[in-house]
Image (cartoon, rainbow, N blue to C red):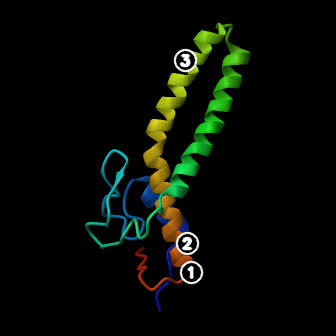
Amino acid sequence: MHSTPPKSLFFRRALRKRCPQCGDGPLFRSFARLRETCSVCGLQYRRESGSQTGAMYFCAAVTEIFAAGLALALYFFTDWSAPLALGFGTALVLGFSYFFLPVSMAFWTAVEYSTDVSNGERWTRPRP
């Protein structure tokens, strides 16, 4: 009988943009382009249509929190005019969202894999 590695391992691997199952194969083929499967262990990253919808919502929620914090910081800590603050804030929020998307996708891949491991899905083969 083998023991299942801690779920935090799956998240650490994915946030390093590696396969959550084996830790070796790359998650992405290019910026924010998730591979279909792991080139090392064969884990299928997208098993169904819409499997990355959660990543989209997660990215949107984190970006909204970032935008709210930025708006408060600009309001309280600068004396910028509204158009200047709005232009700067918009550019920063769009940039943040763009660069956070692959992190969100990697995180969501780990969420799905971790859930499948917990449910005892037969196709999962977690490796230490």
Q: Compare marks 2 and 3 and give the one earlier in the sequence.
A: 3
* Quadrant in the picture for residue 49: bottom left
Image position of 11 (left or right of 23)? right
- In the rendered view, tell whether residue 101 sits above or below residue 38: above
Query: Which part of the image, by quadrant, shows the C terminus?
Result: bottom left
Residue type at the position of mark 3: Phe
Tell me where residue 62 appears, x and y as whole percent.
60, 43
Tell me where residue 57 appears, x and y as whole percent.
57, 50
Dot 1 alpha-carbon crowd within 10 angstroms: few under 14, some 14 to 19, many 20 or more: few
The alpha-carbon separation of the residues under discs 2 and 3 comes to 39 Å
The alpha-carbon separation of the residues under discs 1 and 2 comes to 6 Å
Tell me where residue 69 appears, x and y as whole percent.
67, 30
Q: Which residue is mark 1?
A: 119
Do callouts 1 and 2 mark residues in contact (Cβ within 8 Å)? yes
Dot 3 alpha-carbon crowd within 10 angstroms: few under 14, some 14 to 19, many 20 or more: few
Residue type at the position of mark 1: Asn
Q: Which residue is mark 3?
A: 88
Q: Which residue is mark 2?
A: 115
Tell me where residue 112 appears, x and y as whole percent.
51, 67
Query: Disc 3 on helix, strand or loop?
Result: helix
Residue type at the position of mark 2: Thr
Q: Compare marks 1 and 3 and give the one earlier in the sequence.
A: 3
* Quadrant in the picture for residue 88: top right
